[in-house]
Image (spheres, helix red, strand yellow):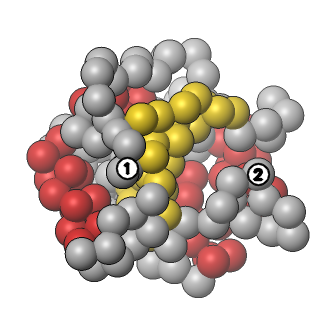
Amino acid sequence: MVAAQTIYFIRHGEKDKSSGSDLDAQGYQRADCLANSVFAGSNPTFKSPDTIIAQDPAQHSSRSEETVTPLAQALGLSIQDNVDRDDVQGAVDLINNDISNGSQIILLAWEHQVLGDIAANFISGDAPTYPGDHFDIVWVVDVPSKTYTLAYENCGF
């Protein structure tokens, strides 16, 4: 089994307050920024993922999938989106399956209140809490050491 080196945990982009289930204009800008400079493009801030996971858009919201769709298209990857937002064990199992299948860099986009519960399975100590007023934080988890660092995607808004 080849261990994944890194898992990026990100929150979906900003939501449209009228629908609650879709991104707003700034959320779509963030999604484009992820694809064009944060995880892909000519000089990305972070290494590009080889696996992208988002919560199932049919269950609660399509925001997570909308956030990573431009990136998936830019990298020619499909989005694994068959796990419900609240199915923490399902998300953990999916990540572990991807690790077992050789994924080296996994990006997971999810609803912020559940991110810590998923991340807790891959880090030592207490899982971080994703602040409700931020959309720009990236938890960078080093899987072999079970440590994480906080980073910012620096999209400028």
Is residue 4 shown above or below 136? below
Residue 4 image point, x, y percent: 39, 63
Q: Residue at x 24, y 75 (%)?
A: 1
Quadrant housing the C terminus: top right
Density class for disc 2 (Cα within 10 Å; few <14, some 14-19, many ≥20) is some
Instruction: Name which residue type carries label 2.
Output: Thr
Q: Which residue is drawn at 71% across and 45% down?
A: 30
Residue 27 image point, x, y percent: 66, 42
Residue 31 image point, x, y percent: 66, 52
Disc assigned to residue 28:
none
Tag 1 residue: 143
N-terminal of the pair, mark 2 or mark 1, is 2
Mark 2 and mark 1: Cα distance apart in space: 19 Å
Q: Residue furthest bottom?
A: 76
Is residue 80 shown above or below 84? below
Q: Can residue 110 be seen in this view?
A: no
Tag 2 residue: 45
Question: In this image, 52 relative to 33: left or right?
Answer: left
SS at circle 2 = loop
Question: In this image, 47 relative to 95: left or right?
Answer: right
SS at circle 1 = loop
Eye-nearest disc, 2 or 1: 1
Question: In this image, 64 relative to 89: left or right?
Answer: right
For this rendering, which residue is in front, 79 or 122? 122
Q: Residue at x 45, y 59 (%)?
A: 5
Residues at discs 2 and 1 in contact (Cβ within 8 Å): no
Instruction: Name which residue type carries label 1.
Output: Val
Residue 125 image point, x, y percent: 28, 21
